[in-house]
Image (cartoon, helix red, strand yellow):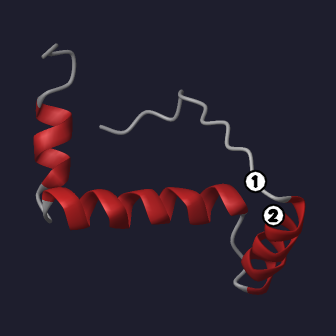
C-alpha cells in the first residue's frame, strides 16, 4: 500500500516552475499530483505494469 510520507525536494529554474504550475492549473491538477503521475509512468516504463507488486511486496526488505 502506498504511503505519502516521503518528501522530495527538487531545484528547478524559476521560469520552468512558473510554466509548469500554469500548465498544471490549466489541467486542474496540483504540481505534486503531476509529479506523482510522472513518477508512476516512469516506474511503469522501467519495471512494467506489475511494478506495484514488485515494489510493495519487497517493502521492508533490504538489498
From the top left corner, tell me how far across and down residue 22 is, in percent: 84, 78
- Above or below — where is 42 with respect to 7? below
The image shows residue 51 at horizontal and vertical percentages of 17, 52
Instruction: State the residue in front, 45 or 34.
Output: 45
Q: Report x, y in % for residue 40.
A: 37, 59
Tell me the SS state at disc 1.
loop
Q: Position of residue 25 (x, y in %)?
A: 80, 77
Occupied quadrant, residue 35: bottom right
Characterize the local packing of mark 1: few (<14), some (14-19) or many (20 or more) Cα atoms within 10 angstroms.
few
The residue sitting at 65% across, 55% down in the picture is 32
Any mark on residue 17, and which? 2
Q: Is residue 2 above or below residue 58?
A: below
Q: Using the image, determine if residue 35 lies above or below residue 52.
A: below
Between 62 and 13, which is closer to the camera in this rendering? Answer: 13
25 on left or right of 32: right
Q: Are marks 2 and 1 in contact (CB under 8 Å)?
A: yes
Q: Is residue 39 above or below residue 23?
A: above
Q: Earlier in the sequence, mark 2 or mark 1?
A: 1
Picture quarter with the C terminus:
top left
Classify mark 2: helix, strand or loop. helix
Amino acid at each position: 500500500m502506498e504511503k505519502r510520507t516521503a518528501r522530495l525536494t527538487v531545484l528547478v529554474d524559476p521560469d520552468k516552475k512558473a510554466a509548469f504550475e500554469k500548465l498544471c492549473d490549466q489541467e486542474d491538477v496540483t504540481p505534486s499530483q503531476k509529479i506523482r503521475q510522472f513518477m508512476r509512468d516512469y516506474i511503469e516504463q522501467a519495471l512494467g505494469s506489475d511494478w506495484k507488486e514488485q515494489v510493495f511486496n519487497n517493502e521492508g526488505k533490504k538489498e
